[in-house]
Image (cartoon, grey):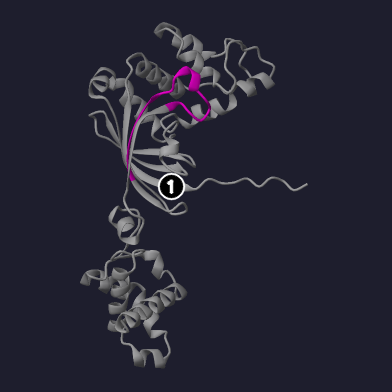
Amino acid sequence: MCKEEKIMANLSEANGTFSFEKNFYSKHQDLIDEYFKLAKESLIGEYGIYITKNNFDGSFDFDGIGRNSMYNTLSWCLAPASYQRYLADNTYEKVLKRKRTIDNYVESDVVPLEVILGLDEDEIIRVVDNPLNIDNKNLLKLTDLDKMFLKLIRVLVKEDSVINFEYKDFEPGSIFLVSENVTIKPSSKSQIKTSQIFEVVSYDSEDLGYNDNSIIENGFESGYDLHKEDDIKILISDCLEEWYESQDDNFRTNYVLEDIINALRVLSDEDNEYNGQFRSYRFEDEATISELVDDALYTVESIKEG
């Protein structure tokens, strides 16, 4: 029997800001600032976010790697990596397999957070030290950072407060580039699953257009705008002059380098895939340059022929 092949998720690249409500932040600034000061290094693994700046007004700038998309990652990405591992190790099913007694839990609920959200404020420390009130020597121990995260969850729930995300998200495998505005809050108890610590309150998405110009202008990749003299000089210096000199005598007799630049400019304007600019990877080697130039020259000839 063949082993089942593991399907890997696509990785999206995101950047933006998330922010707490102003009144909430002013009341809990010490907890929030301290948590994200300590947590920023542990937020990113294969998927997640990395905090690049605390603006000290309740907002934080971040870079992110989404599991298929940043939107699909928001349900858990503010939790420290250690707590995500804890959740994965303490689902209803896994605890049952260890023959632990846990009554009154819904199948697939994550037990520790289910318990936390049902507690009074003064009970949190006792329970997070031993969330199932059993011998937990075989369970992954909650870290101090995990406990700080759960305190933050608790005050968010108690005050019915939300967190807002604004970001741009780019994924070449699934071919999208979007700007999104998403508001989240801690999940209700009936929805607390390993993959869903937070739930979406509101969601708005704008398609930014998937083409070279949009990808470059939104800062996800570098490239060349052949309407700009400086970019033309850089492209020639980077690779185009060397490529041109490697062509045979017949080609260089028919076309001077300026002809190639002009043809590439026409192609970038005529083809919606480029929309006025070329991403750098399109000039990464001789084969890709040759293919692009062939398309450009063909486009120019097609226009001449009407």
Q: Which residues are magenta?
A: 179-198
Q: Position of residue 85 (x, y in %)?
A: 54, 30
Q: Position of residue 62 (x, y in %)?
A: 34, 39
Q: Position of residue 188 (x, y in %)?
A: 44, 19
Vertical order, 227 against 63 (above or below) = below
Q: Residue at 34% x, 68% y: name it.
A: 271
Q: Residue at 55% x, 18% y: name it.
A: 111
Vertical order, 7 against 217 (above or below) = above
Disc 1: which residue: 12
**Dot 1, crowdedness within 10 Å: few (<14), some or many (≥20)?**
many
Residue kind at label 1, given as amino acid type: Ser
Left/right placement of residue 1 relative to residue 36 reads: right
Disc 1 on helix, strand or loop? strand
Of residues 117 and 26, the one nearer the viewer is 117
Q: Position of residue 27 (x, y in %)?
A: 26, 17
Count of marks, rendered view: 1
Vertical order, 187 against 212 (above or below) = above
Residue 186 painted magenta? yes
Q: Quadrant of the C terminus?
A: bottom left
Of residues 73 and 242, the one nearer the viewer is 73
Residue 20 seen from this side: yes
Residue 69 painted magenta? no
Quadrant of the image occupied by residue 157 = top left
Residue 242 seen from this side: no
